[in-house]
């Protein structure tokens, strides 16, 4: 009963999570450090509960859908770089802002995008199957894009190891744990209980994740708001442009409505929580770039909550015969 109540009111609960996180971060900025420290563990738990709802025996079929995979890779690594280059001209005169924009907008999300896709009835199975390809492609192509857009000297100062670490912590381990839980649920009562509890925890974990992320970041953004205002239109325009592009790409690729919803969310959401450690490891003169990434996260979370309402209307499922 409580689980159904939360699912019926999930949008309101997510907005409440964002508001609570903002209040905590602004009224008690000393808690930003502890909040930041638990982002990855909380996100890993959220992804674990998401993966529990995915039937692993159908993942193999998702890997064979090359039409969907080609569409989602084309959107993220052919179309998005062109869009990002154009939008980044807004801040091209400031290298620090430019670097922050490029890092976050050139890397497609691999974590909570799966959750948001599932919430709108998108094809989270095929999106999960695409995740290793999305991660590998961005690890290989981000240095190339940065070299093209910023220069070779800058690329040599970037440490890319956190990419692999984050992929293991928030995708590989939760995915393996969910697969083991599903296997145990077929054999033991204890396994079934764990699976049921985990599946029912997705909404509260999403609320906690949103609150923790915002609490960890909102004070830093507020302290540098004057400098960061220039990137706000870049991120809003990116989301506004990528939604129709994702819809059109899905249609051109012959992808079904559930798959098109997944393409839209993949094109519009970015890998901010994973690239943030890379940006934090840059030389001191790029300190503001980390706040640029954080600003994108805060804007994106609000956009994603709005898209949960809009996408089912923009991409309706076929009427049942």
Image: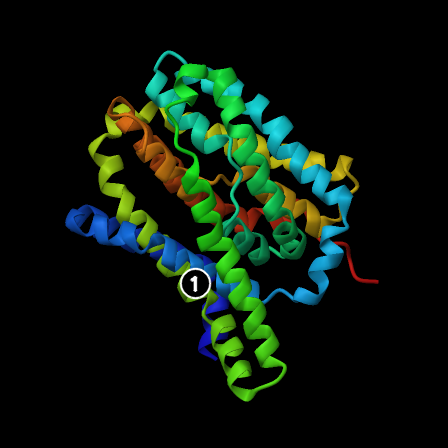
Q: Residue at x 51, y 54 (%)?
A: 171
Question: For mark 1, what is the residue?
Answer: 45
Residue 12 visible to an observer of this rendering: no
Query: For the view shown, which residue lies furthest in the right direction?
Result: 321
* Residue 53 picture location, percent across and down: 59, 67
Between residue 84 and residue 315, name the one nearer to us. 84
197 is higher (above) or lower (below) than 230: below
* Residue 183 picture location, percent across and down: 61, 75
Q: Residue at x 28, y 55 (%)?
A: 20
Between residue 11 and residue 51, name the one nearer to us. 51
Residue 218 visible to an observer of this rendering: yes
For this view, does 233 lie left or right of residue 78? left
Q: Quadrant of residue 67?
A: top right
* Residue 264 picture location, percent across and down: 61, 41
* Residue 125 picture location, percent across and down: 65, 57
25 is higher (above) or lower (below) than 275: below
Between residue 162 and residue 199, name the one nearer to us. 162
Q: Residue at x 52, y 23 (%)?
A: 145
For this view, does 144 lie left or right of residue 236? right
Query: For the view shown, which residue lies furthest in the top direction?
Result: 93
For this view, does 265 lie left or right of residue 98? right
Q: Quadrant of residue 236?
A: top left
Query: For the view shown, which residue lies furthest in the bottom direction?
Result: 189
The 10 Å Cα crowd at callout 1, few under 14, some 14 to 19, many 20 or more, is: many
């Amino acid at each position: 009963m409580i689980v159904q109540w939360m699912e019926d009111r999930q949008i309101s609960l997510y907005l409440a999570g964002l508001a609570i996180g903002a209040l905590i971060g602004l009224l008690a900025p000393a808690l930003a450090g502890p909040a930041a420290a638990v982002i990855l563990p909380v996100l890993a738990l959220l992804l674990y509960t998401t993966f529990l709802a995915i039937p692993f025996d159908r993942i193999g079929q998702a890997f064979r859908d090359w039409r969907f995979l080609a569409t989602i890779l084309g959107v993220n690594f052919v179309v998005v770089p062109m869009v990002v280059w154009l939008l980044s001209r807004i801040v091209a005169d400031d290298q620090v802002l430019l670097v922050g924009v490029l890092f976050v907008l050139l890397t497609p999300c691999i974590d909570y995008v799966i959750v948001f896709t599932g919430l709108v009835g998108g094809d989270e199975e095929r999106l999960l199957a695409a995740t290793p390809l999305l991660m590998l492609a961005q690890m290989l192509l981000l240095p190339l894009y940065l070299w093209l857009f910023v220069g070779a000297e800058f690329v040599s100062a970037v440490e890319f190891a956190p990419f692999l670490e984050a992929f293991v912590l928030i995708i590989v381990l939760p995915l393996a744990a969910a697969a083991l839980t599903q296997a145990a649920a077929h054999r033991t009562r204890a396994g079934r209980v764990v699976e049921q509890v985990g599946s029912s925890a997705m909404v509260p974990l999403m609320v906690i994740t949103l609150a923790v992320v915002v609490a960890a970041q909102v004070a830093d953004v507020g302290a540098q708001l004057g400098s960061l205002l220039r990137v706000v239109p870049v991120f809003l325009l990116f989301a506004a442009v990528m939604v129709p592009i994702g819809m059109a790409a899905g249609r051109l690729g012959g992808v079904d409505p559930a798959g098109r919803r997944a393409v839209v969310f993949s094109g519009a959401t970015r890998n901010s929580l994973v690239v943030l450690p890379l940006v934090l490891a840059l030389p001191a003169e790029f300190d503001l770039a980390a706040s640029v990434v954080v600003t994108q996260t805060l804007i994106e979370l609000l956009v994603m909550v709005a898209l949960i309402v809009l996408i089912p209307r923009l991409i309706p499922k076929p009427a049942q015969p």
